[in-house]
């Protein structure tokens, strides 16, 4: 006769096995970039390449013999990431660490000067870096912009525009903006782009909801930026696309997801949370797959075009571009 202890022990094991099988089944719907074309001679810039999806994207490009510029805020971490990759891939492409702080317009401009001094052309720019910080912390960039607006949108907006000459020289070339389907929850309030009212409300609550409007809004700005830039670059040979890597286990949400959330939500995380490598597949696809060359202004998820549910407005698109230029020129929040 089977003892009750054995039965009790078997129950959690069977649950774990079931969850594992369900995850394996679920992960089959997460597409992989099948293109393995040699990228020797091509130069890629990846912002935030020292960790998470940026790091996994860099690894994939290095395996394909590309030259990869690690544009990172912490140069020591960039060098360490490069050393780790080189141990794994001693014969891969060239890896170059460069300092870039997207929270500082001056740092962005200094970075571009260094790039232009060392490189005649850039084949692909991957705008990957981003932050998610609770609004109650009221973090700002060096110029005083709300941190999600300043880093996730304005930083990459300024960087991209400053590098367009080098991208045009490499035509056909690409710009890939890592956004999120959370852009569908965002909104553009031109009266309060710096979210002063949201931040004050968050401070009064003394707690932060899982949904961060600053992040969602910045991802919506990314999507608008891609659409606007694609229109402006028609005929230049530069493709501009956005992509969503999916819900991934990275340090992006370290400020808002605590250890006990992982315990409480473990079954859901195990089923739906991708690894950084799995999340990087669509980024690599948008950056390298020749089947989408000539496509521009699109949004991709799981290595396929994604039809956003957000009702984009052309007037908002144009106004956001103009206001972004004005804020960067003025060097202060409007």
Image (tube, rainbow, N blue to C red):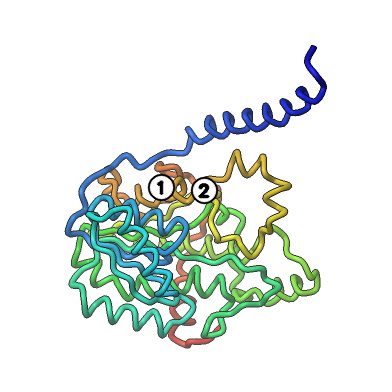
Number of the label disc, if any, that sits on residue 59: none
Mark 2, other Cα within 10 Å: few <14 / some 14–19 / many ≥20: many
Query: Circle 1 sits on which residue?
Result: 282
Q: Residue at x 65, y 41 (%)?
A: 268
Residue 31 % position (x, y): 42, 38
Q: Residue furthest top?
A: 1
Which of these two is toward me, 331 or 125? Answer: 125
Q: Position of residue 49 (x, y in %)?
A: 40, 63
Query: Nearest the camera: 105 or 233?
Result: 105
Left or right for 119, reference 233:
left
Tell me if 225 is positioned left or right of 254 in this view.
left
**Secondary structure type for disc 2:** loop
Horizontal and vertical percent for residue 287? 32, 53
> Seen from this angle, which residue lies furthest right?
4
Between the residue at mark 2 and the residue at mark 1, the CA separation in whole angstroms equals 9 Å
In this rendering, does residue 143 appear at all? yes
Front in this rendered view, residue 97 or 44: 97
């Amino acid at each position: 006769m089977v003892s009750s202890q054995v039965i009790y022990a078997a129950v959690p094991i069977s649950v774990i096995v079931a969850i594992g099988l369900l995850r394996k089944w679920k992960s089959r719907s997460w597409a992989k970039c099948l293109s393995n074309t040699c990228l020797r001679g091509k130069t890629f810039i990846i912002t935030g390449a020292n960790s998470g999806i940026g790091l996994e994207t860099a690894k994939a490009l290095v395996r394909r013999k590309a030259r990869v510029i690690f544009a990172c805020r912490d140069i020591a971490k960039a060098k360490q990431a490069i050393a780790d990759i080189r141990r794994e891939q001693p014969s891969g492409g060239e890896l170059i660490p460069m300092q870039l702080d997207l929270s500082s317009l001056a740092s962005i401009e200094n970075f571009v000067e260094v790039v232009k001094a060392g490189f005649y052309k850039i084949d692909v720019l991957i705008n990957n870096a981003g932050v998610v910080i609770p609004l109650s912390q009221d973090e700002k960039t060096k110029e005083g912009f709300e941190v999600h607006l300043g880093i996730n949108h304005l930083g990459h907006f300024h960087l991209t525009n400053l590098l367009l000459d080098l991208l045009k020289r490499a035509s056909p070339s690409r710009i890939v903006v890592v956004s999120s389907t959370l852009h569908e929850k965002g909104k553009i309030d031109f009266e309060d782009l710096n979210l002063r009212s949201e931040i004050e409300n968050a401070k009064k609550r003394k707690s932060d909801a899982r949904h961060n409007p600053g992040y969602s809004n910045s991802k919506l700005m990314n999507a608008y930026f891609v659409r606007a830039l694609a229109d402006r670059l028609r005929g230049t040979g530069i493709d501009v696309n956005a992509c969503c890597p999916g819900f991934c286990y990275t340090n992006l949400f370290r400020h808002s997801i605590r250890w006990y959330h992982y315990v409480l939500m473990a079954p859901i995380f195990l089923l739906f949370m991708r690894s950084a490598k799995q999340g990087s597949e669509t980024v690599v696809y948008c950056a390298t797959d020749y089947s989408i060359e000539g496509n521009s202004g699109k949004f991709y998820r799981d290595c396929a075009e994604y039809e956003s549910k957000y009702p984009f407005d052309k007037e908002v698109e144009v106004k956001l571009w103009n206001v972004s230029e004005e804020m960067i020129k003025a060097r202060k929040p409007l």
